Amino acid sequence: MIGVGVIGYGYWGPNLVRNFAEVPGARVAVVSDLRAPRLAEVQRRYPGVKTTADPGELINDPSVDAVVVATPVSTHFALAMGALRAGKHVLVEKPIAAAAEQAQRLIEEADARGKVLMVDHTFLYTGAVRKIHDLVHGPDFGDIYYYDSVRVNLGLFQHDVNVLWDLAVHDLSILDHVLPARPRAVSATGMRHVLGQPENIAYLTLFFDGRLIAHLHVNWLAPVKIRRTLIGGSKQMIVYDDLEPSEKIKVYDKGVTLNESNGGVYQLLVGYRAGDMYAPQVDTTEALRTELTHFVECIEGGRRPLSDGPSGLRIVQVLEAAARSIADRGRLVEIEQVRGSQ
Ligand SMILES: NC(=O)c1ccc[n+]([C@@H]2O[C@H](COP(=O)([O-])OP(=O)(O)OC[C@H]3O[C@@H](n4cnc5c(N)ncnc54)[C@H](O)[C@@H]3O)[C@@H](O)[C@H]2O)c1
């Protein structure tokens, strides 16, 4: 039985604790939070779980084999590094760290110690994204042309990171998993509308080799919640609406064809193809349940997780490039390919 320690019982931590309680082969041994009322809540819901205001005490507790870091982004590195150095496996919330250099050091530490380092890229474990992966890599989709997403709502402002580091991480992790190519450069713009707070709205364009393009629109200051992505292929197109209760994915057999007119190749006519639409069945198991089961299996079997340290690093590299671009009003910024990110 793997003993789990969860650091951070704010908004997201309770989801991790609740799901670990359901995962075979694991049990939550200790929860840490700096705020006493949050620890009182843990004691009320889970009387058998130890609580402490000191994350160091959790990390060094002999009943803890794996540490989960669910605190603000600026604290991820120090807590995850402390846990790895204490010989623990680590699952860290997204994004893995506040800087690529920190992510790289976590990867090296985990590798040197033979410990599992996983990042919570939750969407990779949803039935919808697993279905999209299969569709895009299947025989009927054709070449991928674009990924175009809107992820907006009246959201919780994070104080230590801007909206890209909070919401765009989800799309970047989906892109990293689903697309066959890595982005080469980004252009980003964003704006702050609340005094003293980071950018609350941002637009990020990712450029790849060839004709693939991706655009992400994220906003914490929208009156309605939208979670909608269009993925265009040369033969099919996908609409992914994460707020749809049952038909989250719709596959459209639509596209264009180029037909030669009588004038030959110099006069190509665009023809439109509109076939059927279908909504494939997707697995509705809670993503965190699937993900935490995978984490436990990786620890037990010495395997590398799907959302491993290098995938976390690749996303932080894109976010850092986007931050430089925002500071320069959308200037095109190349993404560095750092050692350890492949
Ligand atoms: N995977 C997802 O879909 C998802 C969703 C929401 C948040 N998150 C991530 O989860 C993390 C936490 O976000 P949140 O919205 O829960 O934040 P939050 O502010 O609601 O909760 C963070 C908690 O951590 C505690 N904390 C801070 N520093 C600590 C320390 N050093 N030791 C112990 N406790 C400490 C705080 O007291 C607070 O209760 C962030 O990295 C965020 O990006 C992920």
Image (tube, grey):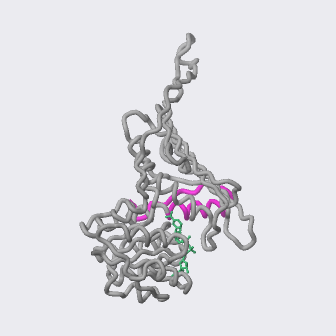
- Residue 271 position, x and y percent, is 56, 21
User: In this view of the protein, which residue sits in the foreground, 149 or 327?
Assistant: 149
Quadrant into which the C terminus falls: bottom left
Report the residue at 67% width, 64% height from top. 199
Q: Identify whether 135 is placed above or below 61.
A: above
- Residue 328 seen in the figure: no
Q: Quadrant of residue 139?
A: top left
User: In this view of the protein, which residue sits in the foreground, 48 or 109?
Assistant: 48
Report the residue at 67% width, 53% height from top. 224
Is 321 within the magenta?
yes
Is 81 within the magenta?
no
Q: Among all residues in the image, which is located at the extreme top?
A: 262
Q: Which residues are magenta?
A: 316-342
- Residue 333 position, x and y percent, is 58, 57
Q: Identify whether 52 is placed above or below 177.
A: below
Number of marks: 0
- Residue 248 seen in the figure: yes
Residue 79 is left or right of residue 261, and the answer is left
- Residue 323 position, x and y percent, is 60, 64
Report the residue at 29% width, 70% height from top. 25
Residue 31 is left or right of residue 23, and the answer is right
Quadrant into which the N terminus falls: bottom left
User: In this view of the protein, which residue sits in the foreground, 249 or 285?
Assistant: 285
Q: Quadrant of residue 280?
A: top left
Report the residue at 38% width, 67% height from top. 118
- Residue 281 position, x and y percent, is 42, 42
Q: Identify whether 103 is placed above or below 249.
A: below
